[in-house]
Amino acid sequence: MIPARVRIWDLPTRLFHWAIVLLVPALWWTHQIDRLDLHVLLGEVMLGLVLFRLIWGVIGSSTARFANFLRGPGRVLDHVRGRAPAAFGHNPIGGWSVAAMLLLLAVQVGLGLFVSDEDGLNTGPLSHLVSYESARTLADRHETMFYVLLAFIVGHVAAIAYYWAVKRDNLVTPMLTGKRDAPADGAMMVGASFWRFVAALAFAAGLTWTISSYL
C-alpha cells in the first residue's frame, strides 16, 4: 500500500531554496571572471530574495514561519538526544540552520552593498555612503564572509547526506515536490493565501529597488 502524501513546503519556500542554490555559484563565478557589473546585479537579486524570505517567515505558510520552527535550547537538546517528537517541517536543529543561513546571506549581501573595486568603477549601490577606504575594507570582509558562507553550505549538504544515508530520510525530494509521506500524527502544512505572497513579493521588490536606486 502506497503511503498517503501531504504538503510540507509551499512553492515560494521551494523557489527561494533553489534560487539560492543557483545564485551562490553564479555570484562566485561572476566574481572570478571579473564580471562585477553582473555580480552586483545578481547581488541585488539575492537581496530581494533574502528580504522576501524574511517577510515570508512571518506571514507565509505554517512550515515557512519562524515561529513554528525556531525552538528553545531545551527542544534542541531533546532532539539531539532523540527524545523530541517527530517534527513536521524543520526539526529544531534544522530550524536554527535555516536562521543561520539567512543571517549569513544577509550579512554577505549587506557587505556587498557598500563595496568598491580598486578602480571605483564597479561599486555596490550604497558605496557612496562610505569612504573609498572603507569600501575597500568592506570588500575584503565581503570576500572573507563568502568562505564562511561556503563552509556553512558544505555543512548543510553534509547534514542532508547524513539524513539520507543514516536516517533514511530524503530531505531533497520534498523540497522539489513540496510533499512527503503523511506523519502518524496527521500534521499538515497550513498554506498562506496568494495575496500574502503578492504582498511579500511586492514589499521585498520595492525595498530592494529603493536600496539599489535611491539610498
Image (tube, rainbow, N blue to C red):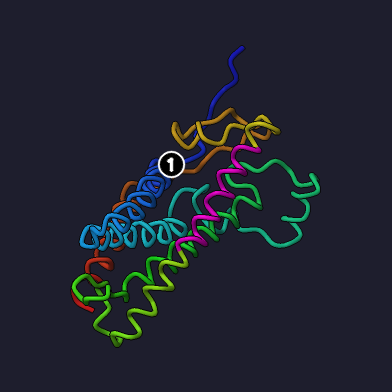
Tell me which residue sits at (59%, 53%) in the image: 95
Tell me which residue sits at (54%, 59%) in the image: 99
Q: Tell me if residue 152 comes above or below residue 180 in the rendering.
A: below
Tell which of 196 and 42 is nearer to you: 42
Quadrant of the snapshot with the C terminus: bottom left
Residue 81 x %, y %: 81, 48
Q: Is residue 77 visible?
A: yes
Residue 21 x %, y %: 41, 46
Quadrant of the snapshot with the N terminus: top right
What secondary structure do most residues of the magenta stretch adopt? Answer: helix
Q: Tell me if residue 178 comes above or below residue 143 in the rendering.
A: above
Tell me which residue sits at (31%, 61%) in the image: 43
Q: Does the magenta stretch include residue 139?
A: no
The image quadrant that residue 55 belongs to is bottom left
Q: In this view, does 169 lie to the left or right of 64?
A: right
Q: In this view, does 157 lie to the left or right of 119?
A: right
The image quadrant that residue 127 belongs to is bottom left
Give amino acid for label 1.
Answer: Asp
Residue that carries the numbered disc 1 in the rendered image: 10
The image quadrant that residue 32 belongs to is bottom left
Residue 123 x %, y %: 24, 72
Q: In this view, does 115 lie to the left or right of 168?
A: left
Tell me which residue sits at (72%, 55%) in the image: 76
Q: Can residue 199 be seen in this view?
A: no
Identify the magenta region: 146-162
Q: Is residue 80 left or right of residue 112?
A: right
Furthest residue to the top?
1
Tell which of 106 and 190 is nearer to you: 106
Label tally: 1
